[in-house]
Image: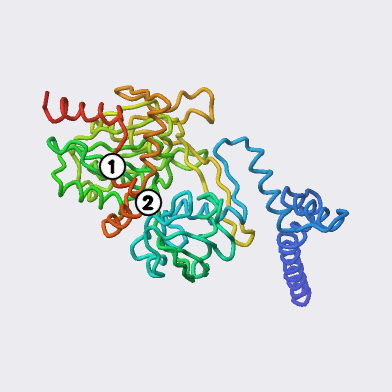
Amino acid sequence: MRPESRSFHLKSILFGAFWASVGILATQHFLGPWLTSYSQATEEQILATVHRTISEDYVEPLSAEALMRNGARGMLESLRDPYADFFGPEDLRRFQEGNSGVLVGIGVMINGPGEVLYPQPGGPAEAAGIRPGDHFLTIDGQAVEQMDRGLMAGLLRGEAGSEVVLEMAHQDGTTFTATVKRSAVPTITVGDVRMVDEASGIGHIHIRSFANSTLAELDHALERLNRSGMKALILDLRWNPGGQLPSAVGVAGRFLDGHLVCSLESRYAPTDRRSANSADGKYFGLPLVLLVNRGSASGSEVVAAALRERGFAVLVGERTYGKGIYQEVFEYDSGEFAMQFTAGYYITPAGHILEGHLNPQLAGGLEPDLSVIPDIEEDRLIRSWQRRNRPPAKYREAMEAAFPETAHLAAPPDRFLETATAVLNRTLLGKP
């Protein structure tokens, strides 16, 4: 073959290879996706089309944002998940506050008639000169007469840095106006803290829920009881619905030595083991009784199972609720909503599933070692006492002067506590 012919063929081959490569790249990156999008519409495309069609063609103008949120809510409801929740713009702040253990408000405890029990030390209300016995007249111009405590609390909350204008009255009838800037105020997740048997050194701590603030509150309570000579503890988890899992693991970890607290099992992810930090086990070996009832759920069941299965605690009370699942939480800031749904099961260190409602084949819950069944009135009085917040020492005298009925309040009879105290005295402390 002549050299000119070989050169011509070589150029042809190179030219063809070049355009073949261009064709392949075009097919992979442009033509293929274009054909796919038109030959088979995805679920996302269909939903977007429906959203656009309704927004543009419905007889009345609609909010595109509201349509989007309602669509998300509908998908969540279709799961038939008893634990799923949707939080729109009006509920989002409440949801975030519940998770964090911090709310945004003025830092004041009030009772039903709109009277100030006491301001929280260091909070905005205290800085504004609000004291025990002061009475709310208006909140941002709204009269509070006949207003219930829940509605008042809602009006006092708001965005951090925002201001609320209050018309107030002192007990002597003089009135004043206070402009208070809202700020983050810790909630109280650790309630009743006291020695229930000083002679034996038995303390009692009630944990209402598990939030980001709980561990600091618990450590403070334990130190206080320790200074009072605590030798054993009744950890009260009655009516505790759960909350933040890291907080629950941390609570269990105060009484463990780096042991496994629970495992998380989901649909696809490998088992996630959650163990206590051995450095946190300052009270490892402390004799324990845990109080549980039908309102003890989720994180409180995780704590109870971990401590009992390791042989470090006795359970007294009722069978627990049986919420043994964990949830994924997704917040969509641009859409002003959040949602949560079941993502997997909690598994105890011994391998038991705590859940008893999502799958009817699962028994769920924890049976107590010693059963106590309260009557309706006993239950009501105990719950009321557990919801009560003791005033800070600096305001106790002023509050009791303003509200004399609070001066001699005593805990109601409580067979749960009596049984737990007897167990610790007889079994763990060696007393008859």
Q: Closest to the observer: 228 or 20?
A: 228
Badge 2, how many Cα within 10 Å: few under 14, some, many 20+?
some
- Residue 234's spot in the image, x, y percent? 25, 36
Query: The N terminus appears in which quarter of the rendering?
Result: bottom right
Residue visible at 59% across and 57% down in the picture? 332
Q: Closest to the observer: 32 or 80?
A: 80
Q: Residue furthest bottom?
A: 4
- Residue 126's spot in the image, x, y percent? 37, 66
Q: Are circles 2 and 1 on residues that touch, CB within 8 Å?
A: no
- Residue 258's spot in the image, x, y percent? 25, 44
Residue highlighted by disc 2: 188
Q: Secondary structure at mark 1?
A: strand
Dot 1 amino acid type: Ile
Counting residues from the start of the chain, the first of labels 2 and 1 encountered is 2
Residue highlighted by disc 1: 205
Residue visible at 42% across and 41% down in the picture? 242
